């Protein structure tokens, strides 16, 4: 199935390979070097559905890929490079799958990502100019996960100058009652914790808005109580991130 000329059958084979990743991990291990090599090549398939399902399947094997340190140049680096390309894919479904897969890879790799931070940040920032509302939510998660994974290694002036402008631009565009503010606040909480004193230039306006969100929630006796509570919770989480980082 994996090598079938019919792309739909190939897609099904790749899906099955992802589905059995956990339950058949022991039996698959001897075959993973060749399978992962093949799957990385499939990220460049013509059909978007093949590219998107390949992103997901590779994410299912991220633990094996990351911890196979002896062959990092063979697996981790090519996979990271190809996923970054797919994050900027012209197809929205592929963008979504690649961004989600990359977040999974970040969680596994942690500080192994540090040498490639510039390339990663350049790609994620570029994605801000391509992505629309739905995929932006996944992009926030990928950025927040990156911050959680590499921690203070993100606190460099060149990284901050790359990362913060698009986030602050988005921050300024969103109204206080916009639900799209939730994932952005969560993302900024991770970034504030990672950047520590590097977040100081952004601290005052972020702190002020979080306090305002909390005050508005406490003063609002009507409306959607659950939504109002959510605004207060994410604002308090970000304030906690600021306190932890500074």
Image (tube, rainbow, N blue to C red):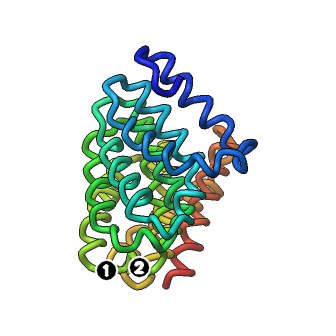
| Residue 8 x, y percent position in the rendering | 47, 16
Against 60, is 242 above or below?
A: below
Q: CA distance from mark 2 to mark 1?
A: 7 Å
- The residue positioned 39% from the left and 73% from the top of the image is 114
Tag shown at residue 153 = 2
Rate crowding at label 2 as few (under 14), some (14 to 19) or many (20 or more) other CA atoms within 10 Å: some
Which secondary structure, mark 2?
Answer: helix
- The residue positioned 39% from the left and 75% from the top of the image is 154
Which secondary structure, mark 1?
Answer: loop
Of 184 and 212, the residue lying toward us: 184
- Which residue is labeled 1 in the image? 156
Against 56, is 148 above or below?
A: below
Quadrant housing residue 241: bottom right
Of 158 and 42, the residue lying toward us: 42
* Residue 177 appears in the figure: no
State left or right for residue 164 relative to residue 218.
left
| Residue 145 x, y percent position in the rendering | 51, 61
């Amino acid at each position: 199935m994996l090598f079938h000329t019919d792309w739909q059958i190939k897609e099904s084979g790749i899906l099955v390979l992802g589905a059995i990743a956990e339950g058949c991990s022991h039996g698959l291990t001897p075959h993973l070097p060749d399978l992962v090599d093949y799957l990385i090549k499939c990220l460049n398939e013509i059909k978007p559905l093949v590219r998107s399902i390949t992103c997901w399947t590779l994410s299912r094997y991220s633990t094996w890929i990351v911890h196979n340190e002896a062959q990092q140049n063979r697996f981790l680096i090519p996979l990271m490079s190809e996923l970054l390309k797919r994050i900027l894919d012209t197809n929205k479904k592929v963008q979504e799958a690649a961004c989600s897969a990359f977040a999974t890879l970040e969680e596994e790799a942690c500080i192994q990502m540090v040498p490639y931070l510039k390339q990663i940040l350049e790609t994620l920032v570029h994605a801000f100019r391509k992505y629309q509302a739905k995929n932006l939510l996944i992009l926030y998660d990928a950025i927040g996960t990156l911050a959680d994974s590499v921690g203070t290694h993100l606190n460099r002036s060149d990284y901050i100058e790359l990362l913060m402008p698009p986030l602050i631009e988005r921050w300024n565009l969103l109204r206080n009652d916009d639900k799209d503010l939730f994932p952005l606040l969560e993302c900024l909480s991770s970034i504030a914790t990672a950047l520590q004193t590097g977040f100081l230039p952004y601290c005052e306006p972020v702190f002020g808005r979080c306090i305002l969100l909390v005050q508005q929630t406490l003063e609002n006796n009507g409306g959607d109580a659950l939504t109002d509570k959510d605004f207060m919770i994410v604002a308090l989480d970000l304030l906690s991130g600021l306190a932890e980082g500074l």
